Image (cartoon, rainbow, N blue to C red):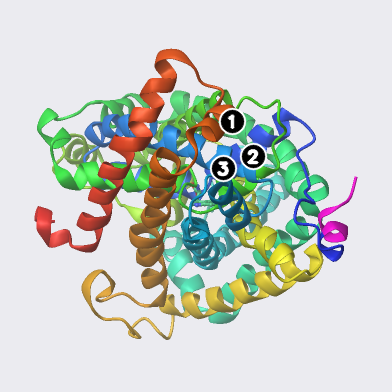
Amino acid sequence: MVTASEGAAMGSATANENWSSRFAFIMAAVGSAVGLGNLVRFPAEVGANGGGAFVIFYIFCVVLIGAPVLLSETLIGRHGQSSAVGSVKKVARESGASEWWAVAAGVGMLGAFLILTYYSVLAGWIVYFIGVFTGDLVSNIASGSLLAGALDGQSVEEVQGILPALQADAGTMLTMHAIFMAVTIFVVARGVHGGIEKVAVWLMPTFFVLILGITIYGAFTGAFGAALEFLFNFDASRLLDPTVQLSALGQALFSLSLGSALMITYGAYASRDTDLAKSSGLIASADTSVAIVAGLAIFPIVFAAMAPDALAGVLAGDVPVEGGLGLLFISLPVAFQTMPAGSIIGFLFFIMVFFAALTSAVALLEASVSWAIRRFNVSRVIATIVLGLTVFAIGAWASFSFNSQADFQPLDFMIFSGQPVFGIIDELTAKILLPVSALLVSIFVGWIADQRLIDSENGLDGGLHKFWRFLVRWLCPIVITAILITGIFPGLVGI
Ligand code: TRP
């Protein structure tokens, strides 16, 4: 077998690395899907959008939009056997369509590349918190109080101040970002077989054990009932709220790593006998389960540490829960202080988040590495290092948004107004690049590509096949167009 780098050196467009098993493919794809999106973004979105209504709508979006687009992306990749751009080109060529459709993958690839710039800054914070909790655990072990709460001896204000202090310290923040990118570059440089797949096959199962363990422990020691009520009880009127609907749709695309060229790229490494329809179903269900389980891990712990009247306000829908990054980096560490064995749980929790972040970061980088190897005829190692360092540099710049450049808002208009660089990258990727790419993919697969070719890859038949075609041709393009328009012009729906 030729490796990708040898193949690239020989100028062969078909040289490809492959997953060593179907299990490896599923773990790598689930590893890419399960990430900070499930552990940080999902709980925050649930909190901001009133709990249960968001969760229900989210599940609809995954089934009706996410899973069909996921299958579309993996099947383009498997047929194309190239980078995402190369794969779309090949399918277009064989369908007698313009190769310009490869823009669908190009936009997604740019999206993945840019997401990684800020993703790795956040992952750097996780690395820092692992450091804090390791120190805490070690000192508890040394003093014989293994089952103590976390960060004993620090006031609540001090714990709440850990993140702001890190953000104020540009040197440390950059160092953490550098450490995370170095690990990501190392894994991707080792290739599909020796790096990406190894990490996924080891870290994802460990991740599942950790998240289940923490959830079960939290169910006994935390406010599990309140968390259940919060996640599944809903106010029917909020189901019709466009803000809730659009957030759920955007989150579904992001969480399943769609519209980012990645599922095309990973599909290209799948063997001919992999059932892509089944695999897509499995990947989508695993990702969704992790998001919900993450809610069931995080909220009981956070709610247990809240004052009863504050919690009652949250459950009544009157008070939003601390959203966004504050949930993970502020509320949770505070809650670990009073949780029994909080020191160990806190340590395991951040390790778990790190595993999820790493398998996603590796995928985010691979989307463009796989393209660069072929486009510039360079070795995998060179492509990975050059692209990885560029991501590091842009990410470093973005990280100053929390520091000296908070007021530097270069694109102060429309969805970018009031956003520093970090926020601009987030808005640009989540609201424009990912939806545009997913929209083009669904139009391409639904309307442009040769349907016999598509059908030879999708492994569906009968009613399910008809249903999938309907979704890809009609529902996905229409709904994704709606996300795009309302995402860019929020005023239209009054949000
Ligand atoms: N799905 C990832 C998460 O939930 C984020 C993501 C979006 C991603 N697009 C991607 C990861 C492409 C890998 C590749 O955190």
Alpha carbon distance from label 2 to label 1? 8 Å
- Disc 2 residue type (three-letter): Arg
Q: Mark 1 Cα within 10 Å, few/some/many (few <14, many 20+)?
A: many
Indicate yes or no whether the magenta region holds residue 71.
no
Alpha carbon distance from label 2 to label 3? 6 Å
Q: Residue 46: x percent and y percent?
A: 30, 41
Residue 74, which numbered label? none
The C terminus sits in image quarter: bottom left
- Is there a contact, CB below 8 Å, between mark 2 and mark 1? yes
Residue that appears at 38% across and 21% down = 466
Q: Residue 492: x percent and y percent?
A: 11, 57
Residue 331 is left or right of residue 136, and the answer is left
Q: Which residues are magenta?
A: 1-7
Residue 76, which numbered label? 3
State the residue in front, 88 or 302: 88
Is disc 2 placed on a helix, strand or loop? helix
- Disc 3 residue type (three-letter): Ile
Q: For residue 213, say whether it is visible.
A: no
Is disc 3 placed on a helix, strand or loop? helix
Q: Which residue is mark 2?
A: 78
Question: Would the CB of label 2 be found within 8 Å of ligand 1?
Answer: no
Image position of 176 with respect to 52: above or below = below
State the residue in front, 344 or 250: 250
Is disc 1 placed on a helix, strand or loop? helix
Q: Residue 418: x percent and y percent?
A: 26, 76
- Is there a contact, CB below 8 Å, between mark 2 and mark 3? yes
Q: Which residue is mark 1?
A: 457
State the residue in front, 418 or 432: 432
* Residue furthest to the top: 462
Q: Residue 434: x percent and y percent?
A: 41, 55
